[in-house]
Amino acid sequence: MTDAFAFPDGFLWGAATAAHQIEGSPLADGAGPSIWTRFAHTPGLTHNGDTGDVACDHYRRWKDDVRLMRELGLTAYRFSVSWSRVLPEGTGRVNPAGLDFYSRLVDALLEAGIEPLLTLYHWDLPAALDDRGGWLNRDCAGWFAEYATVMAKALDGRVRKWVTLNEPWVITDGGYLHGALAPGHRNKYEAPIASHNLMRAHGAAVQAYRAVGRHEIGLVVNIEPKYPASDAPEDQTATRRAHAYMNEQYLHPALLGHYPPELREIFGDAWPDWPAEDFALIRQPLDFLGINYYTRNVTRADGSWPLKAGAVKQPSATYTETGWEVFPQGLTDTLLWVRRTYGDIPLYVTENGAAFFDPPVAEGGRVRDPLRIDYLRRHLRAVHEAIRAGCDIRGYMVWSLLDNLEWSLGYSKRFGIVHVNYATQQRTVKDSGRWYANVVRSHGRAL
Ligand SMILES: OC[C@@H]1[C@@H](O)[C@H](O)[C@@H](O)c2nc(CNc3ccccc3)cn21
């Protein structure tokens, strides 16, 4: 009998985190501030005024956390580098202590038989570069390429899977259009410029990596599939607009060399005529794509700015603490759409997970999180369905290894398969962590 859920040989079973969300010690040992150091310390911008000053104290507890990953049996770990820990001013002077932190972390991962997946940029731009215009300054492509070169020279070979950017859509939509994320701009004219420069920087970093590195590099995007609320033409076109804005805006230039036409329709006079040579820079050959999937969106036409498209709540669905519908079929649909639209590029599910209200740690050290187990089981089965349908999916990273700092939402949302007591920094593996460890051990057959 064939195994119901046999995953490909070499499929990587991992967990994901990001520097600002877990490390703490943002200014330790010569590190420079990032835009999130400043944003979180600006009154009123984060839940409860929560900051990343301590977070999960991973900067000091990283050895214990790698031990935890090994105990869970993970075969991969996706993490990000704090750019300003390595280059305190963003360019020029390298901080040896910052580089050394990541070098020791990578060595410990390899020693534990865990494949590192390194994300160069997970939202924490050096504040010194923001002072120079940040992603609004076309020089950012050179800054990011310089940073990629420093990291590749230091770690390539031990790190064999590199990611340039995590979710350019969130960086732009959150940081430059709606202002909910650092650097907190709300400007329809800045957002396309930041977005385009992020993709130029992605291309420049891929070129810089290939001049030094000998392994794999890719891009991570968040994809939220859009389903029309009705057959009405206005809902159909609104769904098309939302899909182009969130799901095609970055993969099209990176893989096809052009933007979807809807973006000029959405942004109007705020959408520049980009220099043709930019697309040759942006469209660099990639070794893989990382897909972050959490939920879907049932879309209808509405008066909202700037998309004129909004979400329709699904009355019979389960929703997470972040208000996201649990819809595993959307992950299968997403993976098949990527393959259909961009070809058979190798894929990793680089983030998938959910925040539910977890009970406190019970006597004997248990955290019962059945809703998270159900979410993960159903989404892993959705991954397997896409594999059976022909997608070349190389791995899955659960978001997240640890409960951590959920950006502007502070510590109010818990995504971890491991509970963190922020007062004591005590880690407690949740039921979902034990369940995931068993899935990993069985290479998926326990699903
Ligand atoms: O919100 C959970 C995680 C977050 O902690 C990660 O740092 C980030 O990579 C991440 N991306 C998404 C999906 N995209 C998204 C959509 C709207 C707002 C915020 C994130 C979820 N998450």
Image (tube, rainbow, N blue to C red):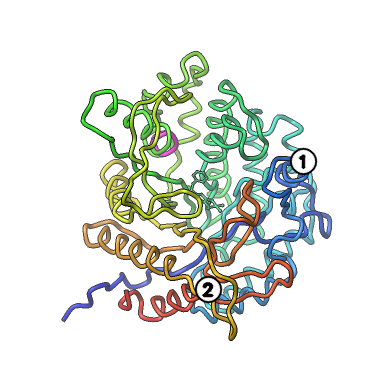
Residue hosting label 1:
43
Say which quadrant the C terminus sits in. bottom left
**In the displayed structure image, the side of residue 102 where residue 178 appears, left or right:** left
The image quadrant that residue 79 belongs to is bottom right
Residue located 44% across and 66% down the image: 372
SS class, disc 1: loop
Disc 2 designates what residue?
A: 114
Q: Is the magenta stretch mostly helix, strand or loop?
A: helix
Q: How crowded is mark 1: few (under 14 residues within 10 Å), some or many (20 or more)?
A: few
Under tag 2, what secondary structure? loop
Residue 20 at what x, y percent from top left? 67, 54
> Within the image, what quadrant is residue 242 found in?
top left
Q: Residue at x 32, y 78 (%)?
A: 446
**Which quadrant of the structure image shows residue 359?**
bottom right
Q: Which stretch is magenta?
A: 248-252
**Amino acid type assigned to the residue bearing label 2 in the image:** Ile
